[in-house]
Image: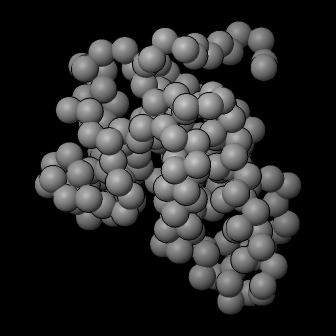
Amino acid sequence: MPDGLKRYYGRGDLHFVTFSCYRRLDLLRAKRARNLFVSELARVRRERRFRLAGYVVMPNHVHVLMSEPAQGTVSTVLQMLKQRVSRKMRRTKKRGREAQLALGFEGEELRSFWHARFYDFNVYSRGKVKEKLNYMHANPVIRKLVKHPKDWPWSSWSDYMKGQQGLIEIDAVL
């Protein structure tokens, strides 16, 4: 782990995690790419047994509010998730130009799909949970992708505000 970067595990806190695509490229800009990510997040969640309290998938980064997994750490979960998404995206890319366009990327061969590091903030209070969820759900509006969070299905907004399950089951914490 790089100097100065500390991760605090084993306290029972939720973790607000942010990770980005390589060079902050919009590698998740296509609907199919975001759907693939959400599908893999659900799969890794089942396998690693962690609570998913919230998420938003943006074109060039992802925010997740999660518990620690039953086995391993948040770091091992993210490694698994990022590897699976990267491999599936690259496999689809190799199928040709049509697949590349459908997933929303083409051009030069990427050295990596994801930025190597991630930001992890321990969420230790109900107030911080609310703050992080509000931040996540507002992200698509702030980035001018939609006018209202309800119009961005790749987030947990509908679970909290409408009481309806979105693309992935959420372990509501509020």
Is 96 above or below relative to 38?
below
What quarter of the picture does the C terminus occupy? top left
* Residue 32, position as x, y percentages in the image: 53, 74
Q: Is residue 64 left or right of residue 139?
A: right
| In-front residue for pair 143/87 | 87
Coordinates of residue 23 in the picture (x, y in percent):
71, 47
Judge left or right: residue 130 versus residue 53.
Answer: left
Is 16 placed above or below 31 here? above
Q: Please tell me in which quadrant of the rendered image residue 7 appears.
A: top right
Name the one closer to the observer, 79 or 100. Answer: 79
Measured as percent of width and height from the top left, residue 115 is found at 71, 42
Picture residue at 78% right of the left edge, 18% below the top: 2
Q: Quadrant of the N terminus?
A: top right
The residue drawn where x is 35% and y is 54% is: 169
The residue shown at (74%, 87%) is: 97
Query: In the orientation shown, which residue stands out farthest toward the left?
Result: 162
Q: Can you see residue 111?
A: yes
Q: Residue 152: x percent and y percent?
A: 32, 61
The type of colouring in the image is one colour
Question: Residue at the location (41% across, 46% down)?
Answer: 55
